[in-house]
């Protein structure tokens, strides 16, 4: 079963500001993510501190998507950007 992805307003706002290169990468990585959120190529990892309960996966060495699991089949993309999104 494929994951359902919800996009927060914050994610949508920051996604709009990304370069076309990052947007294209995000779309390609999302395809992989929908099949397996823990695919090795995504480098998915748990976050700690203020963002405990969230996960992130890599788009580039600098860019990430932060997400959490709403339930077994639903994921919420919370934010996208460089390391500044970690606060």
Image (spheres, rainbow, N blue to C red):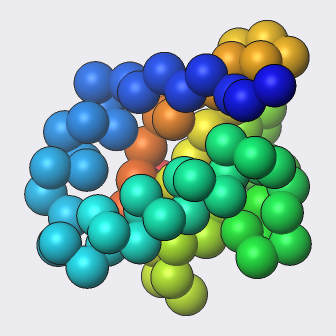
Q: Quadrant of residue 5?
A: top right
Q: Is residue 5 visible?
A: yes
Left or right: 44 with respect to 15?
Answer: right
Q: Quadrant of residue 12?
A: top left
Left or right: 56 with respect to 46?
Answer: left
Q: In front here: 70 or 74?
A: 74
Q: Position of residue 55 (x, y in %)?
A: 73, 46
Q: Position of residue 25 (x, y in %)?
A: 41, 72
- In the image, is residue 2 above or below residue 40? above
- What is the tally of numbered marks visible in this picture? 0
Left or right: 65 with respect to 9?
Answer: right
Farthest front residue?
A: 1
Q: Position of residue 64 (x, y in %)?
A: 52, 64
Farthest top residue?
A: 71
Left or right: 54 with respect to 13?
Answer: right
Q: In front here: 49 or 31?
A: 31
Q: Quadrant of the N terminus?
A: top right
Residue drawn at (24%, 48%) of the image: 14
Residue drawn at (48%, 65%) of the image: 28
Residue drawn at (43%, 62%) of the image: 26
Q: Position of residue 77 (x, y in %)?
A: 51, 35
Residue drawn at (48%, 34%) of the image: 78
Q: Is residue 45 visible?
A: no
Q: Quadrant of residue 27?
A: bottom left
């Amino acid at each position: 079963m494929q994951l359902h992805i919800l996009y927060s307003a914050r994610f949508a706002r920051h996604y709009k500001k990304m370069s076309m290169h990052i947007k294209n990468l995000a779309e390609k990585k999302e395809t992989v993510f929908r099949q397996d959120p823990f695919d090795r190529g995504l480098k998915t990892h748990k976050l700690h501190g203020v963002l405990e309960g969230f996960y992130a996966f890599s788009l580039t060495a600098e860019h990430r998507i932060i997400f959490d699991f709403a339930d077994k089949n639903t994921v919420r993309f919370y934010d996208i950007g460089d390391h500044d999104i970690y606060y």
